[in-house]
Structure formats: structure tokens, C-alpha cells
């Protein structure tokens, strides 16, 4: 075989020299130019000869590159020069936030960091990537980062690896171009590149090294941490002003626990930053259990300034409980507010493990006695106690390449957040954990989310479940179907379900008092962004409420227009009688009539249809979000959104609030949550009696005195409206859809049961 290849190469070389000699001979036979008046020049070779030599040079270089089985490309991304300004509106006009992407064959090789507000960015980043095909150019694209919108394209260029000298560092300045604007100057990218040739042995060693790294990652992943420290960074106050010109700072936080670190986002130009970031750190038995927190001021030109630090000894904190803490900053000014939870314990001797847990009836009696309805002056926090036993799950989706997952479950009740340990390489985890929560609001919703743990402690969504506390059946052990992220359909997998047993004990009188007081804000929540689907859904919800008022208005208009004489005459008599005999106590009496009618419907129909378990075929259909939109359409949409984004977001949230308020009134009167409906009936009876006994003028005087004297007598109380506070506890239709359960059996079984029933 080697002799055959050598013969082929020899034949190609002989054919090349023969063609070159023939072309040279043709040049020599041409008549010589006159030398009387012009100096003598060597004859220029014909284009055919030059092209042949270039082809031969290219072929020899390709042959030289193909001798190597492997290459390593080292790139030093230095800086950009004279880039385009893409931010042309607002305070940041005339700037860009550029970053660079390197791709080869559609595969992302590297993505640089973002340099904010700079047209001459300095990245100063180095990376090394393996290259198997040097004939495939590396595409370099520059983008302008836009928060919440599509990033703007700032130009691209190609890096031809075949033009590089092997093993030699080369400085390159590449001009950026846009195919749609070929004559526009878009700036330059300055690089330093080196292409190192490697042998087959080097390639084998590289692959072996990567295999070892993967094995180490797997071993680290399999290492059992003792607990998970969940931290919610809420806010800080009264920080030091490091920017003397603006008398403010650009603060961010750094956290360190053992070898794990976390850095928060930067909040610009404020001494009272609000971050609202949530993250997890892992606690191991063989490491120091001290969480270090430092606050820094971000500087673009110089080194970041130190604002203060604090330490938290985790060994002194109670496990499986969310701690709210304000910490004073040492070596600086100000305080920082954190929510910290230590959960996910894997030790079998902990109290949260079901295998070693023995239920004591006396403990349950003490808890029930503590939350008896007449015990209002107890020092115990909250209005009740919740116990959740998480046994396991089945039918989960396979998130890893091996057809398995590494699932763990997170439980959230308000600002309290607990989680189980991770079960590795399984689709049917058995967590066997028991958790307890202090119930601060009986109208709260317990959320359970199942995640898959990936490398570097990243997570992937597997399923979610929402259960209102008032819907819990004490002591019932059952399977609950998991939903997807939108909470409208079943999660991916083989009918994924989770096995739970729950028990809630609460004081009904303290719960009623808490319901008519301001609701505790949830510190960690996602900011609502403008979405076309959400906007349309909120408009349709509001339309349904408005149409009801329109129908009532049409009936009254028909009475005014005497479309039906009998109905108009009866309406006139009713209005005259109402105006003549009306007393204020009749208003809650009429509302009680509506409650009585809907209570009969509630008792006869068996509940609200939005809370009845359904199959997949009966779920509400939603349109999928458009993932791929034409580039020009996106650009035009972006230009419009830049002007109306804030307005549309406000309108969207306002429409959603009004729709939620109207649906809450409807659900309150429909006995969707019987406890709240009975509480509203009790309040209406009380209002009716008060209005019957006490004249309205005295009540209005007392109300005015209370409002004017509140600031003097109770300066720290929050002004509130008891009716709106009560309605805020009533779930709207969206929340009811989130909490609606799915049937645990497949629809095929139901169809088979129907067929058998018909046959019988």
C-alpha cells in the first residue's frame, strides 16, 4: 500500500514538471521585444502557470496539514476597535455592550464576557479548543447585548486556519462586515492565534485526559453533601457612598462557603440595593461551616472598592427552617437582608428522614392544643402547622444521556424553602423525607417542584405541583400528577407522579384575623416581562368580567327603554320601593342573597369545576410561543418595544390585577374556597347587625376619626383595606388552574373502563 501511494505521488510530480516545461517552452518561442528604446524585462509567466503553481502550493499545504491527526487552537481575544454604537435611545445613547462568539461547523467554541457601554472593549481572554478539521474556518461574530430583547448583530469575520503558520504566534486584526451592508465599516477585532499540530499520541492523551476529567466530575457529583444552603439575597440599606460625584455606589455581593463561590449582579447607582436573587451552596461534613459575605462597589476603571463584610456560622442555625436575618456589615456601613435555609440533609439519623421517624401521638396532641381556636395570645408564630411527608416519585422524564435522571424535590411555602437530597441515576426516586412548616397564612399555596441535578450543581425542570393548604386532606397518602412549567398540562415523562402525605393543623380564629391583614410579600419572584400570549390572556380575562357588566347594563337599558312593558313596570315599582324603604343593612342582606343562591349551586353541583381533576384531553389549550421569527420582523418589533415596553408592561400587569380582583369576587361568592366564603358570610352578618343597630352617620364619624388618628396613635401600622385583603386570599381562575389536579391513571384506562361499562 505504501509503495502504491509513493508511486502515485511520483507520477503527480512528473506530470506537474512536464506541464511547467511545456509552458516555459511556449514562453521561450515567442518573439523578443525590441530593446532599442526600452530596458529589458524578464518575460512574465502566463496566468495558467501561476494558477498551476498556486494549486500545487495549496495541494502541498493540504497534504502537509493532513499529516497531523489533531490540532489545538489557542486564541487570545485582546480587544475591539471602533465598534458600532447600537444603543441609540435613552441615557446610554451612543454606546454598545459587545461580546464575541466563536463558532466552527455550527458548534459554539467560546463566548466572551460582556463589556458594558464601550465601543473599544478590552476582553483580554484566552482559550484553547481542539480542532480536527483545519479546513473549516472559524466564524467570529460580535453582538450587542440587550436586556430582555434580541441582541443586535454588530458584524462578523472568518478565521482561515489553513493560512496560519503551524506552531507560531500570529497577531491578527480582522475587519468586521455585515453581509447586508458590505460597504459599511463596523470596526475591528484584535486577536493573537496559534495553531499547534499534534500527533495521534497527543490526541489519545487529550481524549484520555478529558475522560479522566469527566470521571472526576462524576465522582464529585456522586459525593454526598450533608446539606444544601439556600440563600435569598433580598436587599441592603445604608451602604457607604464610594462614587463621590454621584454620592452613590454600584454594589454587588460575593458569597463563599468552602470551595463554592457565588457573585450577585450589580445594582447601579444606589445605596439601598434590591437584588432578589436565589442560589444554592452545598455543605460538606469535612469543611468549615462558616458562610462569608462581602459587599463590593463596582468600578470600571480601577479596582473594585470594599464596602463591608459579615460572617454567618451555619452550625448554630436550626436545620429545615427558613431564617430571616439582617446582618450588620463589618469594616463598613450598612446592613444586608438575607433569607437562609439549611435543608436537603442526607444523613439517615436526622429527624427529617422517614425511615427513622416514629410518630408520637402525644406530640400531635400538643400541636393541636397549641392551635385551638380560643388560644389567641399564644407566643407561637403563625396561624398553624404543616407536615409534609415526601415518599418518592415515579415516571419522571430522563434528563441525562443514559436514560436516567438525578432528581430532588423542592418544597416552597411563602418565603420558606426546603428540599430533599438528590437520588442519582433513577427515574423512581425514594426520598423518604418529612418536612414541617410554620403556616403564616392559611390561604397560602404549597408548591413542590422536582428538578434534575446536573454538573456544577445546575438544575433541569422535571415537574411541578401546587396544593392550596385549605384543600389538604389530613393523613391521606396518595399520588399527585406533576405538571409542566406553565401548570396547564402534564409534565414530560411516563405520567410522572409524586407520593405525598400531608397534615395541617391551624387556628381558625387566628387564620380569620390574618386573612384580613396585609399579605406577606414573597421576596423571591420572577419579574413579569411583556409577553404577547400573557397580554392576550389577561385581555380575555378582563373581557369576560366586562361582558358580565355589559349584560347587566343591557338589562337595565331595556327596562329604561320599555322594550318589555311588564318588566319595565315591575322594575319601576321595585326601584320606587327600594328608594322609599332602603336601609343600609339591606346592602349586605342583598349580597347574602347572592351567597345563598351560589351556596345552593355549590352544594348541588359538588364544587367549582376549575378544581375538579381532569385528563390531558380536557386541559385548556394554549398556543405555543413563537420560537423562530424572521430577523427583519424581530428588528422592527424591537424598535417598537423600545418605545412602548414600559407602558405595555404596566398595562399588562394592571389588566391582570383587575381580572384577578374580579375573578376573586366571583370565586368568593361561588364557594370556590368554602372557608373564605363562610368567613365573608360571617363578616356580612356582622356588618348587617352593626348597620342595623348604629346609624350610618356615627359609623362614618368613627371611620373618619380612625383614619385621621391612625398616624398619631399607630404610626408604624400599614394602611390597608380589609375587603381587598380578604379578596387577595381568594384564588383567581389562573391560580385555580395551577392547583387543579390531574388524574393519576392514563386516559386509555378510562376509555377501556367506559367500553366495559357500555358493554355491560
Image (cartoon, helix red, strand yellow):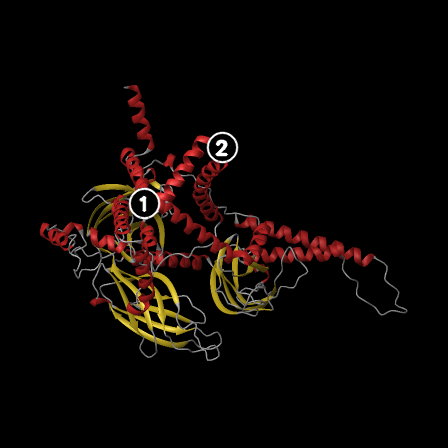
The image shows residue 588 at horizontal and vertical percentages of: 31, 46
Foreground of the two, 30 or 448: 448
Q: Which residue position is annotated with label 1?
A: 586
Say if residue 499 shows up in the picture.
yes
- Left or right position of 157 against 454: right
At x 40%, y 40%, the residue is 575
Foreground of the two, 166 or 35: 166
At x 48%, y 68%, the residue is 125
Name which quarter of the figure residue 36 lies in: bottom right
Determine whether the residue tagged by mark 1 lies in a helix, strand or loop.
Answer: helix
Foreground of the two, 263 or 92: 92
Q: On screen, 693 above or below 670?
A: below
The residues bearing labels 2 and 1 have C-alpha atoms spaced at a distance of 29 Å
- Left or right position of 437 against 69: left
Q: Which residue position is annotated with label 2?
A: 563
- Left or right position of 648 against 313: right
Amino acid at each position: 500500500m505504501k509503495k502504491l501511494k509513493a508511486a502515485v505521488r511520483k507520477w503527480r510530480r512528473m506530470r506537474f514538471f512536464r506541464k511547467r516545461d511545456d509552458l516555459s517552452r511556449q514562453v521561450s518561442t515567442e518573439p523578443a521585444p525590441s530593446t532599442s528604446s526600452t530596458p529589458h524585462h524578464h518575460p512574465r509567466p502566463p496566468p495558467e502557470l501561476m494558477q498551476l503553481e498556486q494549486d500545487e502550493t495549496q495541494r502541498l499545504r493540504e497534504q502537509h496539514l493532513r499529516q497531523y491527526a489533531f490540532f489545538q487552537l489557542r486564541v487570545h481575544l485582546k480587544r475591539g476597535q471602533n465598534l458600532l454604537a447600537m444603543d441609540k435611545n435613552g441615557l446610554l445613547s451612543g454606546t454598545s455592550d459587545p461580546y464575541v462568539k466563536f463558532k466552527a461547523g455550527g458548534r459554539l467554541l467560546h463566548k466572551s464576557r460582556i463589556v458594558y457601554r464601550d465601543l473599544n472593549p478590552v476582553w483580554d481572554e484566552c482559550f484553547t479548543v481542539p480542532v480536527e478539521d483545519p479546513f473549516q474556518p472559524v466564524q467570529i461574530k460580535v453582538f450587542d447585548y440587550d436586556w430582555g430583547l434580541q441582541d443586535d448583530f454588530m458584524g462578523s469575520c472568518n478565521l482561515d486556519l489553513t493560512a496560519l503558520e503551524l506552531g507560531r504566534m500570529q497577531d491578527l486584526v480582522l475587519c468586521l462586515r455585515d453581509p447586508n451592508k458590505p460597504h459599511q465599516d463596523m470596526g475591528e477585532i484584535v486577536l493573537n492565534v496559534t495553531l499547534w499540530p499534534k500527533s495521534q499520541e497527543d490526541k489519545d492523551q487529550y481524549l484520555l485526559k478529558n475522560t479522566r476529567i469527566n470521571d472526576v466530575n462524576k465522582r464529585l457529583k456522586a459525593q454526598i453533601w450533608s446539606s444544601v444552603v439556600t440563600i435569598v439575597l433580598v436587599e441592603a440599606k445604608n451602604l457607604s457612598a464610594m462614587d463621590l460625584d454621584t454620592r452613590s455606589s454600584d454594589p454587588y455581593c460575593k458569597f463563599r462557603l468552602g470551595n463554592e463561590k457565588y457573585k450577585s449582579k450589580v445594582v447601579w447607582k444606589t445605596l439601598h440595593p434590591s437584588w432578589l436573587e436565589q442560589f444554592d451552596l452545598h455543605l460538606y461534613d469535612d469543611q468549615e461551616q462558616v458562610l462569608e459575605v462581602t459587599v463590593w462597589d463596582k468600578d470600571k476603571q480601577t479596582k473594585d472598592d470594599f464596602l463591608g463584610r459579615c460572617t454567618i456560622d451555619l452550625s448554630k442555625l436550626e436545620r429545615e427552617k427558613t431564617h430571616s436575618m439582617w446582618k450588620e456589615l463589618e469594616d463598613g456601613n450598612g446592613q444586608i437582608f438575607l433569607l437562609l435555609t439549611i435543608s436537603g440533609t442526607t444523613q439517615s439519623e436526622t429527624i427529617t428522614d422517614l425511615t427513622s421517624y416514629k410518630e408520637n401521638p402525644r406530640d400531635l396532641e400538643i400541636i393541636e392544643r397549641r392551635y385551638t381556636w380560643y388560644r389567641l395570645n399564644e407566643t407561637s408564630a403563625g396561624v398553624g402547622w404543616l407536615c409534609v411527608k415526601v415518599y418518592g416519585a415515579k415516571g419522571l422524564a430522563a434528563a441525562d444521556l443514559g436514560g436516567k435522571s438525578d432528581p430532588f424535590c423542592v418544597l416552597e411555602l411563602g418565603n420558606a424553602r426546603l428540599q430533599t437530597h438528590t437520588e442519582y441515576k433513577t427515574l423512581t426516586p425514594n426520598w423518604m423525607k418529612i418536612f414541617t412548616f410554620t403556616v403564616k397564612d392559611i390561604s397560602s399555596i404549597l408548591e413542590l417542584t422536582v428538578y434534575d441535578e446536573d454538573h456544577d450543581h445546575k438544575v433541569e425542570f422535571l415537574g411541578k405541583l401546587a396544593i392550596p393548604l385549605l384543600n389538604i386532606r389530613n393523613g391521606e397518602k396518595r399520588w399527585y400528577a406533576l405538571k409542566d412549567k406553565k401548570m396547564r398540562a402534564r409534565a414530560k415523562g411516563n405520567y410522572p407522579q409524586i407520593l405525598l402525605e400531608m397534615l395541617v393543623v391551624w387556628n381558625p380564629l387566628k387564620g380569620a384575623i390574618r386573612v384580613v391583614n396585609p399579605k406577606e410579600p414573597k421576596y423571591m419572584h420572577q419579574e413579569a416581562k411583556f409577553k404577547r400570549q400573557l397580554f392576550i390572556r389577561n385581555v380575555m380575562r378582563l373581557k369576560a368580567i366586562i361582558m358580565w357588566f355589559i349584560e347587566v347594563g343591557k338589562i337595565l337599558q331595556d327596562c329604561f327603554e320599555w322594550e318589555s312593558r311588564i318588566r319595565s313596570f315591575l322594575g319601576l315599582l321595585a326601584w320606587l320601593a327600594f328608594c322609599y324603604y332602603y336601609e343600609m343593612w339591606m346592602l349586605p342582606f342583598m349580597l347574602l342573597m347572592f351567597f345563598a343562591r351560589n351556596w345552593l349551586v355549590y352544594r348541588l353541583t359538588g364544587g367549582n369545576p376549575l378544581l375538579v381533576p381532569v385528563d390531558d384531553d380536557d386541559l385548556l389549550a394554549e398556543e405555543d410561543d413563537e420560537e423562530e421569527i424572521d430577523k427583519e420582523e424581530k428588528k422592527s418589533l424591537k424598535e417598537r418595544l423600545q418605545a412602548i415596553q414600559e407602558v405595555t408592561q404596566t398595562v399588562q400587569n394592571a389588566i391582570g390585577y383587575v381580572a384577578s380582583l374580579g375573578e376573586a369576587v366571583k370565586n368568593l361568592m361561588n364557594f370556590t374556597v368554602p372557608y373564605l366564603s363562610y368567613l365573608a358570610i360571617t363578616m356580612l352578618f356582622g356588618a348587617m347587625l352593626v348597620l342595623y343597630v348604629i346609624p350610618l352617620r356615627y359609623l362614618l364619624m368613627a371611620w373618619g376619626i380612625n383614619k385621621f388618628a391612625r398616624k398619631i396613635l399607630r404610626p408604624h401600622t400599614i394602611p390597608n383595606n380589609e375587603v381587598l385583603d380578604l379578596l387577595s386570599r381568594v384564588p383567581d381562575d389562573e391560580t385555580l388552574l395551577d392547583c387543579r389536579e390531574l388524574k393519576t391513571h392514563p386516559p386509555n384506562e378510562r376509555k377501556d373502563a367506559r367500553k366495559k361499562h357500555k358493554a355491560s
